[in-house]
Amino acid sequence: MISQHEIDTFVERGAVLLDGILEPELIDAASEEMDRQYDAHENNDIGIIQYVFGDSLEEIYQHPHLEAIAKKVIGTNEVDFIASAFLHTLPNSAEKWGYKPETEHVDIQYNEEEWCQTPRRILIMFMIFLDDVTSERAPTVVRLGSQLSIAKHHGTKDAYKDRPQYIIDLPKLNYEAMTPLTGKKGQVAVSTTSLIHTGSFNTTEKARKMFFVSYAATGSNINFNTNLAQERLDYMNELHRRFSPERKHLVEGTIKQLEGILLAENNL
């Protein structure tokens, strides 16, 4: 499913594209579910919908291939499901493709020890292509290798994690030029939101459709978006109820972590 060369590419570059990870019929079902949820949303122009439910989506969260790849990339025997989100970009009026440089950002940062240790103390994000994403259909654009440059800059110092940081506030390093992450329907990119990235314009006639699923090593206790801890806990508890008995372990570590965060806040 993933080779050592592909793992090394992810570690060095922050993204690697894989084929044949999820069944085509599951991709189709998830794409249809995404359409239903956006059609039903009170604001169907919204770009991102987080913490999503649906039979096909929950099948993906529990998928043994994603769990196996996450374990191998992180270097651990146990991983937890962390988060999910839909993200689509409607066609817009831009005459030519591009992006807004001031919106480049990272969602989370790691230091060199966290990125390079075994197991890695990082979140693995799977970018699941629910449709073809061409260079004109709002691909995510990234500065490949920036996650490692930032990690090395931090060394063993704590790296900021709780909120996204925009390019203006990031370390001034010699980053690579931005690269569009394109892919075919059904492909899966192993990536990280610690890459400098942003969205881009959609100059085609179809919406860009992406589905994001994240995992981390059990017990890594990576705290982020702590202001959403209760919402995330409610989501994980409902997934625990919905998951098959032999797959419930995928959310139990995250539930324990979120309960600990909320308990600590209540004791302040």
Image (cartoon, rainbow, N blue to C red):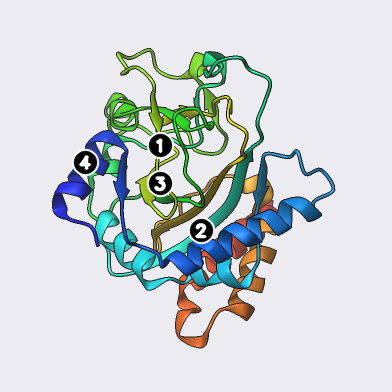
User: What type is the residue that disc 3 sits on?
Assistant: Lys
State the separation of the CA atoms marked 1 and 2. Answer: 24 Å
Q: Which residue is mark 4?
A: 9
Mark with earlier residue (4, 2): 4
State the separation of the CA atoms marked 4 and 2. Answer: 23 Å
User: What type is the residue that disc 4 sits on?
Assistant: Thr
Mark with earlier residue (3, 4): 4
State the separation of the CA atoms marked 1 and 3. Answer: 7 Å
Crowdedness near tag 2: few (<14), some (14–19) or many (≥20) residues, C-alpha within 10 Å: many
Which element type, helix, strand or loop, lies under badge 1?
loop
Foreground: 252 or 66? 66
Establish if 137 lies above or below 238: above
Marks 3, 4: nearer the viewer: 3
Figure disc tally: 4
Q: Which residue is mark 1?
A: 182
State the separation of the CA atoms marked 1 and 4. Answer: 17 Å
Foreground: 19 or 54? 19
Say left or right for 238 vs 243: right
Which element type, helix, strand or loop, lies under badge 3?
loop
Q: Which residue is mark 3?
A: 184
Crowdedness near tag 4: few (<14), some (14–19) or many (≥20) residues, C-alpha within 10 Å: some
User: What type is the residue that disc 2 sits on?
Assistant: Ile
Is residue 10 in view?
A: yes
User: At 73% across and 51% down in the image, what residue appears?
Assistant: 38
Marks 1, 2: nearer the viewer: 1
Quarter in which the N terminus is drawn: bottom left
From the top left corner, tell me how far across and down residue 143 is, in percent.
36, 25
User: What type is the residue that disc 1 sits on?
Assistant: Thr
Q: Are marks 1 and 3 in contact (CB under 8 Å)?
A: no
Marks 2, 3: nearer the viewer: 3
From the top left corner, tell me how far across and down residue 30 is, in percent.
57, 62
